[in-house]
Amino acid sequence: MKKKDSNGGFMTIMDMLGQSGVLTLLGMGVVIGFLVIMIITITILGKIIHALGWDKDTRSASAAPAVSKQGEITAAIGAAVSQYKKNN
């Protein structure tokens, strides 16, 4: 238990600053601890996924049509803008 101080149990500014400093350091420690645990977990999971071969890209054959489709869309937008500039 905390002893009563001479000013009726109220905290002084120095007491409040000390307590806020301790709480700040405790909060930062919890955040850093969580980040370290998260980094370790992600690293371990990445190694497990790589070891099981789940990191291979199975969509590489279907990615090529998407790129050409994107090129067609870009060309169509460019042609529409060019036509708009000619007419206006």
Image (cartoon, rainbow, N blue to C red):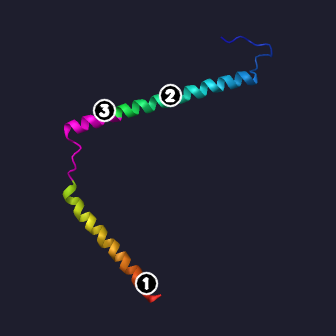
Please provide percent x and percent y for residue 1.
Answer: 65, 11
Please provide percent x and percent y for residue 37.
Answer: 40, 30
Q: Which residue is drawn at 40% across and 82% down?
A: 82
Q: Residue at x 76, y 22 (%)?
A: 12
Please provide percent x and percent y for residue 79.
Answer: 36, 80
* Earlier sequence position, callout 2 versus callout 1: 2
Q: Which amino acid does label 2 sit on?
A: Val
> Does the stretch in magenta take in 48?
yes
* In the displayed structure image, the side of residue 56 where residue 20 appears, left or right: right
* Earlier sequence position, callout 2 versus callout 3: 2
The residue carrying mark 2 is 30
Q: Which residue is drawn at 33% across and 75% down?
A: 75
Q: What stretch is highlighted in magenta?
A: 42-58
Dot 2 crowding, Cα within 10 Å, few <14, some 14–19, many 20+: few
Measured along the vertical axis of the image, is residue 42 above or below residue 71? above
Please provide percent x and percent y for residue 17.
Answer: 69, 26
Q: Image quadrant of residue 72?
A: bottom left
Q: Image quadrant of residue 65?
A: bottom left
Q: Residue at x 27, y 64 (%)?
A: 67
Do the residues bearing badges 2 and 1 touch, measured as CB atoms within 8 Å? no
Circle 2 — which element? helix
Circle 3 — which element? helix
Label 2 – label 1 distance at C-alpha: 58 Å
Dot 1 crowding, Cα within 10 Å, few <14, some 14–19, many 20+: few
The residue carrying mark 3 is 44
> Does the stretch in magenta take in 55?
yes
Do the residues bearing badges 2 and 3 touch, measured as CB atoms within 8 Å? no
Circle 1 — which element? helix
* Earlier sequence position, callout 1 versus callout 3: 3
The residue carrying mark 1 is 84
* In the displayed structure image, the side of residue 12 where residue 71 appears, left or right: left
Q: Which amino acid does label 3 sit on?
A: Ile
